[in-house]
Amino acid sequence: MKTLRLGILGYGTVGQGIVALLQKNQLSWQDKTGCNVVVTAIAKRNWDGIDKPVGIDCINDATAIVNRDDVDVVLELIGGEEAAYELILRAIENNKHVVTANKALIASKGREIFARAAEKGVQVAFEASVAGGIPIIKSLKEGLIANEINSVAGIINGTSNYILTAMRNEGRAFGEVLKEAQDLGYAESDPTFDVEGIDAAHKLTILASIAYGVALDLDKVEIEGISHIAPQDVRYAETLGYRIKHLGVALRRPEGIEIRVHPTLVPETALISKVDGVMNAVRVFGNAVGETLFYGAGAGSLPTASAVMADVLGLVTNLTAGHVSPLGYANNSNHSTRVLPVAEHQSANYLRFSVEDKPGVLADVTRIFANQSISIEALLQQKESDNAVYVPIVIVTPVVNEADLQTAITQIAQLDAVQGDVHRIRVEKF
Amino acid sequence: MKTLRLGILGYGTVGQGIVALLQKNQLSWQDKTGCNVVVTAIAKRNWDGIDKPVGIDCINDATAIVNRDDVDVVLELIGGEEAAYELILRAIENNKHVVTANKALIASKGREIFARAAEKGVQVAFEASVAGGIPIIKSLKEGLIANEINSVAGIINGTSNYILTAMRNEGRAFGEVLKEAQDLGYAESDPTFDVEGIDAAHKLTILASIAYGVALDLDKVEIEGISHIAPQDVRYAETLGYRIKHLGVALRRPEGIEIRVHPTLVPETALISKVDGVMNAVRVFGNAVGETLFYGAGAGSLPTASAVMADVLGLVTNLTAGHVSPLGYANNSNHSTRVLPVAEHQSANYLRFSVEDKPGVLADVTRIFANQSISIEALLQQKESDNAVYVPIVIVTPVVNEADLQTAITQIAQLDAVQGDVHRIRVEKF
């Protein structure tokens, strides 16, 4: 099996997520790509108090990583602009592919980086730089490639969305919620980058360039933060049928492209208005596909690692087969995963049936459930009119075995007091 | 510029969408891929009453297309299983790549097709076979490749979702809504395929195979339709805090994979419960990324064409550069698209300011808007207490020029009766 050797610059949240993910998912990556991914070395300035991952060369000097012969791909996860830029250029000079999560660097120096990479014939990938685990760059660049894009509008900063969500749900002021978010670790001690829209502007710069082919240029983004939003704005917006979201918007008009980050009233009927807390979502409107929305975690150790490793594994398939195998698994034959027959399925359930309105019926019904060890999570019994002979009963169960549930249903249907069928609908508690 | 020549089998809704899209977006496809995509020939058994597209060889014999030397990629859009299978195999034998929207065929004969394609070194792509314009196959196979998938749950049949949405919104019975959907053309005269879950099962078979590496096998899917859902189920579900959606669910348990299509109670707090009408959405939960959702049009001429052409343009980039260019445009230099300065932006707006509670103030305010030709879409004036001296006024404008709006804001702020700043938040009417 071919091996792809990674060198990682930085071992913070994301780097640790990648090592954790490698341990969990390495075998499925082999199944999918036919290639073994290993981490050769990680550079971190100071390892004090950090558990060094076993079997990986843990060093202090980032430059040593980009110069090593036993590294095929460099993962730049140190952030910041100057040092990261120098390291990435050096990696490219050394004919290494680069994967980065560094939105500020791509937004400001992407042009120079991509040009040098093209000259050297290596690839630079940056899915993790926008909206964390959501594969929005791939979706926009490849999935929706056949479209001319009319607009992109995204909740692309989790901190701002967390604050606006709490302001709405709890009727509280910006400053109060920000302080709480800082205490909980959802906001930095200097929150400017997030709540004043600078982080979102970096991401939007990248999305706008992909959507419209315009140059990466942070200076072309109109930027407004959320710190001036007052509780009464949230309330009035609600009265008018809107929610306030901090959006990055890039839209095409006949005259040109508008690129702007600002708090926005969004109709409460729009799906994006329901995206709450630290979650991210990007709405893309294309001239063929119409409206789409891509939703997921915009930050965090494993979600960001998911995006970084998607780039790495994408490199693998590009470099080996030239494309992904049709159903996504290069070694399908290795798979012994069993598909379960219906009798072994499990689910929560909604049951509805009609019973005679007389004493003891509910006791009979609940005894049947008890005998199958099925507890009852909710029960509705609502007489529909005073002189109705039959009363509908609705029961919600927790997740149970299908076979046990079917036994219970059969026994309930056989009770004298039950009229007609027992109607069952599954429940999924997303 | 390199040219890629398409031969299209079938000229129904999707085929016509592709030709329409080619006319609209061909230049942007050249910018993105550095390659010119042309349609050489289209086969349709009977062209009576159909406008033949200009400059394309419109013929009757599908077999002639898969045998032509001037066709590089065959687009199979005739549907059905037997004839489509023979034509695709013949195209593969002739070393042509194949793009298809045929979910039934991929679900039943995908294995044979992919095996033969691998032997011949050609590619078979089928993004349009699941969830129309949503790039869910690419997202699952590539965007989320680094994850082991815990569950996939999708609204993947627009007809069923349209019916369930109308049953809920209008409190009507299944049969009644179905009849209306048939009259409106949203449901077939024989609706079995859609409302009994067979179409969804074909799509879920494909998604499950990609998510878990299990073999394509329609027989392993437990299938239940929505025709037995009664109005009182919709009502009781609502009382319990749920919506009923027709879902395709494929989930991993330690024992194996469950694959099932059935009506499902979904918590009304879950994003997927808000997906209404004919729209589709697929929720994917991965062991790294956590929860994601992909939303868009599941059918229709241009949305399906969007997915078919994404496959075609993906082939182009695989065959030429081996990968997509970093920001999605091969010929970025051709782009003269202008990014607009903020003074030229346009948006709808929410304005809030406080005025003295005395006669004539509102007349002064509204005259300022009239002078800038800005109409007022909504106005809220709510005294917060009886003895308050100042009254907050909230105004929502339609889409206006930023420069005009700023003039109006400046003039309002200068009115004697106005106290403090004029607060402005943009409005987007998604």
Image: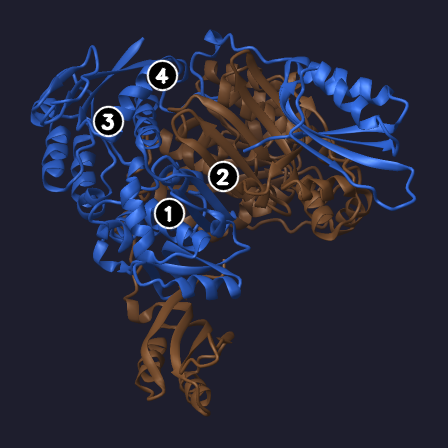
Chain colours: A brown, B blue
Tag 1–tag 4 contact (CB < 8 Å): no
- Letter of the chain that mark 1 sits on in the rendering: B
Task: Work out whether residue A344 or residue B131 is closer to the camera in this orientation and state it.
Answer: B131
Task: Give the x, y percent position of residue B19.
Answer: 27, 20
Q: Is residue A84 visible?
A: no
Disc sitting over residue B162 in the figure: 1
Q: Can residue B408 be seen in this view?
A: yes
> Tag 4 or tag 1, which sits nearer the N-term?
4
Give the number of marks. Answer: 4
Task: Identify the residue position indicated by label 3 in the image.
Answer: B15
Task: Give the x, y percent position of residue A205.
Answer: 60, 23
Task: Identify the residue position indicated by label 4 in the image.
Answer: B24
Task: Identify the residue position indicated by label 2 in the image.
Answer: A294
Answer few, some or many: residues within 10 Å of disc 1's Cα (few below 14, many 20 plus, some between 14 and 19). Answer: many
| Residue type marked 1 | Tyr
For the residues labelled 3 and 1, the Cα–Cα distance comes to 24 Å
Answer few, some or many: residues within 10 Å of disc 3's Cα (few below 14, many 20 plus, some between 14 and 19). Answer: many
**Element on which disc 3 rests:** helix
Are tags 4 and 3 found on a single chain? yes
> Tag 3 or tag 4, which sits nearer the N-term?
3
Task: Work out whether residue B160 or residue A335 is closer to the camera in this orientation and state it.
Answer: B160
Q: In which quarter of the image is the N terminus of chain A?
A: top left
Tag 2–tag 3 contact (CB < 8 Å): no
For the residues labelled 2 and 3, the Cα–Cα distance comes to 27 Å
- The mark lying in front, picked from 1 and 2, is 1
Identity of the residue furthest to the front in this view: B359
Q: Residue at x 20, y 35 (%)?
A: B118
